[in-house]
Structures are given as structure tokens and as C-alpha cells.
């Protein structure tokens, strides 16, 4: 392959971290592959999910629904924001979040206030649901999305293992408010490390890029 050639080009360019031609080309290639308006490259998939949560306003006053079986990074990213993860069962066919478990929890353990869902026990805002497409298999994403919309909960997809996977010809990671990918050594493609945020929301994408580049502010 051309890996050695590309590495030398990158070194010769002087841009070996955060920005540069190769980062831009990588983001553009991911846009084309996933049919997403905005892609923000990050240093890891965990960082991508952490930034995605922060950009959606997740903090210590929130709870985030996720699945009981996933790589630990999914729950870690939620915990980094100060939010509490709420673990629900997985589906035996997809190994991802069970729509039945999600529906049961939302029907029996939440109440509505000012257009949002709150936990009956803790009275905390349930602001987001993070599902992980296990081993690249699609979750029952349409059913999960419908439930999230019904209960006014943001859907965020951990598609770390699912680059190239689709549901009804739509890329996994593009059904929710945003999604993330990982390029760790055990993923579909790898850069040794790396991640990306996918979103069609321009304001979210701008904030995510701002956070991912150490909150730099343009100046003369």
C-alpha cells in the first residue's frame, strides 16, 4: 500500500496532529461514505462520544440511557460528563439495546414535565439515549428512534464497531442527533487510534469541532 508514502507526506507537510490535509481528506471521505453533512475527526472513539455528549448539553443534572452490555468506553464517556448512566437490557438478536426494555422503562419509570422525560425515582432529566451497534450489527434503530422521539430524548449512536454497516441503505451512526465512529486497532479500519463524530446538525458540529480543538477561538 501507500501508507509509508502518506506518512512521509504528512511529516513533510508539518501538520502531524489535529489539523492538516490528511485530516480534511479523511473527514471528507467519511462524509461521502456515510452520507453525513458534518464529520469531526477526534483522537479516539471515546473522545468522540464524550464530546458528542457535551455538545448536546449532557451534564451532572442528567441521566443517559444506555445498554447493559457494551465496551466500557460507552459508559465511561457518559460518566465523564457527570451524568449517570441508566443501564437497560439488550436484545438477544441484535445484542444492542432492547426496544422492549426501553419502552418498558419509559412507560413505567418516567414522567413528563415541560416537554421532557424525568426519572420517577431520582427526578433527574433523562436527556439522551446512547445505543451501541454491537459487533457492527444494527440495533432495532427505527423502533428505538421512535421511542426516543415520543419521549423527547436525544438519540446518540455509538457506531464504533459499525463503519460500513447500514439499515435500509442508511449508514449506522446517522439515525440519531449524532453518531460516533472509532478507528482503534480492533475496528473496521484503523489509524492505530482515532474517532469521528457524525451529524447533520450544523450548530452541533460547530460546537463539537470547537471542543475537539481545545476550544480555540479565531483571532487576527
Image (cartoon, helix red, strand yellow):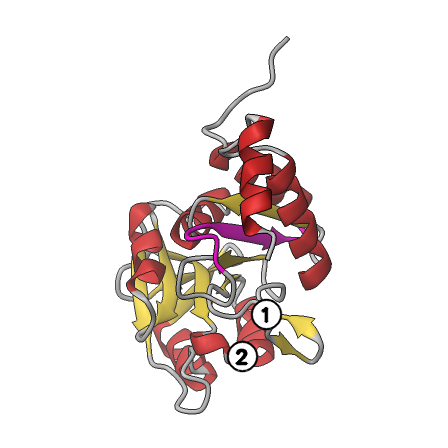
Q: Is residue 193 magenta?
A: yes
Q: In the drawing, what numbered circle is on residue 11?
A: none
Q: Position of residue 103 (x, y in %)?
A: 45, 80
Q: Residue at x 40, y 66 (%)?
A: 186
Question: What residue sits right under mark 2 in the picture?
Answer: 138
- 72 or 22: nearer the eye? 22
Q: Residue at x 50, y 80 (%)?
A: 137
Q: Is residue 93 above or below residue 211?
A: below
Give the magenta-colored segment's residue range.
190-201
Count of numbered marks: 2
Q: Position of residue 128 (x, y in %)?
A: 45, 59
| Disc nearer the start of the sequence (2/1) | 2
Q: Is residue 32 above or below residue 219?
A: below
Q: Is residue 82 visible?
A: no
Q: Residue at x 73, y 57 (%)?
A: 32
Q: On the rendered image, what quadrant is the N terminus found in?
A: bottom right
Q: Quadrant of residue 101?
A: bottom left
Q: Is residue 98 left or right of residue 109?
A: right
Q: Is residue 22 left or right of residue 42?
A: right
Q: Residue at x 69, y 62 (%)?
A: 33
Cα–Cα span, label 2 and label 1: 7 Å
Q: CB under 8 Å between callouts 2 and 1?
A: yes
Report helix, strand or loop for mark 1.
Answer: loop
For label 1, the crowd category at 10 Å Cα-Cα, with few meaning under 14, some 14 to 19 and many 20 or more, is many
Q: In the drawing, what numbered circle is on residue 172?
A: 1
Q: Is residue 6 magenta?
A: no
Q: Position of residue 105 (x, y in %)?
A: 37, 77
- Name of the residue lying farthest toward the bottom: 93
Q: On the rendered image, what quadrant is the C terminus found in?
A: top right
Q: Is residue 24 visible?
A: yes
Report helix, strand or loop for mark 2.
Answer: loop
Amino acid at each position: 500500500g501507500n501508507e509509508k508514502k502518506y506518512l512521509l507526506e504528512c511529516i513533510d507537510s508539518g501538520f502531524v496532529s489535529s489539523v492538516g490535509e490528511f485530516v480534511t481528506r479523511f473527514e471528507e471521505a467519511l462524509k461521502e461514505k456515510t452520507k453525513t453533512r458534518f464529520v469531526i475527526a477526534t483522537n479516539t472513539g471515546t473522545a468522540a462520544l464524550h464530546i458528542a455528549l457535551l455538545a448536546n448539553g449532557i451534564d451532572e443534572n442528567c441521566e443517559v440511557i444506555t445498554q447493559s452490555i457494551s465496551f466500557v468506553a460507552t459508559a465511561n464517556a457518559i460518566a465523564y460528563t457527570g451524568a449517570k448512566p441508566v443501564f437497560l437490557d439488550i436484545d438477544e438478536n441484535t445484542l444492542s439495546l432492547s426496544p422492549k426494555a426501553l419502552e418498558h422503562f419509559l412507560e413505567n419509570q418516567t414522567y413528563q414535565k415541560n416537554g421532557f422525560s424525568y426519572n420517577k425515582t431520582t427526578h433527574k432529566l433523562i436527556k439522551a439515549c446512547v445505543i451501541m451497534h454491537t459487533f457492527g450489527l444494527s440495533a432495532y434503530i427505527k423502533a428505538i428512534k421512535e421511542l426516543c422521539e415520543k419521549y423527547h430524548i436525544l438519540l446518540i449512536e455509538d457506531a464504533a464497531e459499525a463503519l460500513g454497516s447500514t439499515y435500509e441503505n442508511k449508514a449506522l451512526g446517522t439515525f440519531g442527533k449524532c453518531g460516533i465512529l472509532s478507528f482503534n486497532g480492533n475496528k473496521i479500519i484503523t489509524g492505530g487510534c482515532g474517532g469521528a463524530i457524525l451529524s447533520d446538525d450544523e450548530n452541533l458540529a460547530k460546537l463539537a469541532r470547537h471542543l475537539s480543538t481545545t476550544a480555540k477561538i479565531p483571532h487576527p
